[in-house]
Image (tube, helix red, strand yellow):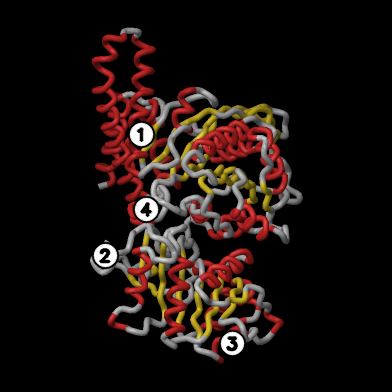
Amino acid sequence: MPPAFPERAAWGTASSLRAWQEQALAAYFAPAHESGPRDFLAVATPGAGKTTFALRLAKELIERKVVQAITVVCPTEHLKRQWAESAARVGLKIDPEYQNGQGRLGKEFQGLAATYATIAARPALHRNRTEMQKTLVILDEVHHAGDGLSWGDAIREAFEPATRRVGLSGTPFRTDINPIPFVQYEEGPDGIRRSRADYTYGYGPALADGVVRPVIFLAYAGEMRWRTRAGDELTAALGEPLTQDQTAQAWRAALDPKGDWIGQVIAAADRRLTEVRRGMPDAGGLVIATDHEAARAYAKMIRAVCGEGATIVLSDDPTASKKIKQFGESEDRWMVAVRMVSEGVDIPRLAVGVYATSTSTPLFFAQAVGRFVRSRRRGETASVFLPSVPTLMGHAAEMETERDHVLDRPRREGDGLDDDLLKEANRRQDSPDVGEEVPFETVEASATFDRVLYDGGEFGTHAVPGSAEEEEYLGIPGLLEPEEVTKLLRRRQAEQLAAQRKKKTGDPALDRRTDTTAAEDLHALRDQLNGLVGAWSHRTGKPHGVIHNELRNACGGPRVPQAGAEEIISRIAKIREWAAKRR
């Protein structure tokens, strides 16, 4: 923390600003522009407190008489109300119910909150409002302003006359090459233009400051069996190297309520929630489902597991915002929502999640995980349960990656950074797609605990649900510092590997002499391999999970947590060989 803020706790509260919020305000009111720049882009990881920063800035600009009115633009109806409620707590009155047809804003309000769609419907109206008073425009999740040329043009038309504009984003990257309005781009040495943020606060620094929770990802594999339209029965193991089609079908079978996989994972997540509640008594869980039918089925599973009903939130339910608010203020255990909640839920007590959707775009994944990382006090941890799918494993391993919006590059098919997929993920999805022909019928789906991903490392060995090996990871305390999580995971994995060797040799005396050294050597080799995989991922753009699967295909052997020293050494040699050839 810089000396400019000696009395600010990095993990402070909204009433006493966090260090990064103070720093961002200082950057805004830098000596070069004492009254602030006309445009300012603040990129901060989900859960860090972007709303608090923007509202404090708004209040300061009003008090300095730089602006007279505020317009907040955000992606969803629910977020409009959240902005208005947050503004009220700092003494600003924002109307979240403003409609294009009502004309003037009520005299009691200092501004309004509207969706991007509302602004795009009548940009001339909002331009007129902006011209009538000195206006501060806050563009929340500003990357949405680039959703298609028409939206971008409408946002520019409406707010070009604004006195001040502040862009906020936790995930500012996009795959299209439509420039985001009012965002500055700089050309790099490679001739490619990239967005430039005026202040950036990433997940890594936020985690170090205690502003966000560390995320423990618990991945589950398993055997899937399904029947095709032709009547053939196919079997695949989720988590094993598969073709793209096989992975998609096995993933779908895993999430099918007719199989046992999702029920077993929900039961494991509920046990984890019970453990977390020992230190966070009001901790809640969220299952992100794909559609209405699956959401209701998952809610029934939750009642069968814990004896309590779950709050169900559907995107076309007019009471959705009310349900979300009620759940946030209660101590209920579980909420089940369709996947549209990735940018629409702000419930700090959410600490356990089940990613029960096949949506794999990294924007959606980052926003979904962002629902669980908001920290209220030091030591809180977040736990997210995932299918053991390479795409998701790659996203989980890259939690600390920061991206900028890149222009001047060809669009790559299948790169995963697809905004059309994000829109598809967030659209109303309360029933299976009309006319979609079911490609198969799930026959059987069972889960096995695969591994834990944390801080770029992999921990754990295969275990059946309910086993002592699984419980050791489900029982990790819910209040731990990030470094304590790492130490605990390493110790538990070493103990499990030592126990496995004892079972194989049957010689307790020999095992006692070799267990500690062998575990330490194996851990060092895994760290070395993971470091090389991270470097190769940076050079090639491939997710970590994909690279690990390619190494397994080339060298043979099991996954890293189950691989022996010789198998890991072979993979280290192989990835070095790839690097030498690339040079």
The reply, left or right, for residue 46 in relation to residue 332 is left
* Mark 4 or mark 2, earlier in chain: 2
Q: Which residue is mark 1?
A: 488
Tally the marks: 4
* Mark 4 or mark 3, earlier in chain: 3
Name the one closer to the observer, 426 or 454. 454
Q: Depth-wise, is mark 1 or mark 3 nearer the camera?
A: 1
Q: Position of residue 53 (x, y in %)?
A: 43, 69
Q: Which residue is mark 2?
A: 6
Crowdedness near tag 2: few (<14), some (14–19) or many (≥20) residues, C-alpha within 10 Å: few
Q: Secondary structure at mark 2?
A: loop
Measured in 3D between alpha carbons, the distance from the residue under mark 1 to the one under mark 3, in whole angstroms, is 57 Å
Q: Which residue is mark 3?
A: 129
Q: Amino acid at mark 3?
A: Arg
- Residue pictured at 72% horizontal, 34% vertical: 229
Q: Which residue is mark 4?
A: 210
Cβ atoms under marks 2 and 3 closer than 8 Å:
no
Looking at the image, residue 571 lies above or below residue 534: above
* Mark 4 or mark 1, earlier in chain: 4
